Image (cartoon, helix red, strand yellow):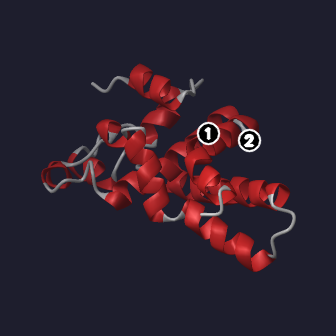
Amino acid sequence: MTDWDSCQRALGVYFNDVSLLEQAFVHSSYLNENPDFPLPNNERLEFLGDAVLDFIVAENLHTGYPELPEGELTMIRAFLVCRESLNEVASSLKLGDWLLLGRGEEATGGRARQSNLANAMEAVIGAIYLDQGLDISKKFVLRQLEPFLERIRAGG
């Protein structure tokens, strides 16, 4: 079975309810082949995580860049929360190692698929929010996005 302790160590977040973490990695293809699996897929957590991520990034940019107009803040936020950026963060955390995938998804490279990794990243954020609250979610998100924020501060 999956080693959720090593996943928590990699994330730097320790869950009170590990089933939320596990759910964040359940791809719909896994449930198609394992209909008796006790957890739902990660899509609802992904939905929530997307909103939490947008809020955290928007608040950080609003506070950290008071001189920037709304249009520039929107462009920066879009860069920070886009699929490519989330995929890069998810890859650095090796989130693909913990994905629960169906055989077909596994066989076609689903562990490295950008959409699966970005979706898992959002689902993890949603799970952290539900389990740990906004403050821990904010620390986690900003820690993961720090390399991107550094580029922005440097004018990139």
Q: Is residue 83 left or right of residue 142?
A: left
Q: Residue at x 75, y 37 (%)?
A: 135
Q: Residue at x 71, y 53 (%)?
A: 56
User: Camera-side residue: 91 or 154?
Assistant: 154
Residue 42 appears anywhere in the view: no
Q: Please, which residue is most extreme toward the bottom here?
A: 71
SS type, badge 1 = helix
The location of residue 148, given as percent across then percent down, is 57, 53
Which residue is the site of mark 1? 143
Mark 1 → mark 2, Cα distance in angstroms: 14 Å
Which amino acid type is marked by label 2? Leu
Q: Quadrant of the image for the N terminus?
A: top left
Q: Nearer the viewer, mark 1 or mark 2?
A: 1
Answer with the quarter of the image where residue 127 lies. top right
Q: Is residue 108 left or right of residue 37?
A: left
Q: Specify the label residue 49 is tagged with.
A: none
Which amino acid type is marked by label 1? Arg
User: Camera-side residue: 98 or 36?
Assistant: 98
The location of residue 23, given as percent across then percent down, is 44, 40
Answer with the quarter of the image where residue 12 lies. top right
Q: Disc count in the image? A: 2
Mark 2 is surrounded, within 10 Å at the Cα level, by few (under 14), some (14 to 19) or many (20 or more) other residues, namely: some
Which residue is the site of mark 2? 134
The location of residue 117, given as percent across then percent down, is 38, 52
Relative to 78, residue 20 above or below? above
Relative to 59, residue 68 above or below? below
Q: Please, which residue is most extreme toward the front here?
A: 154
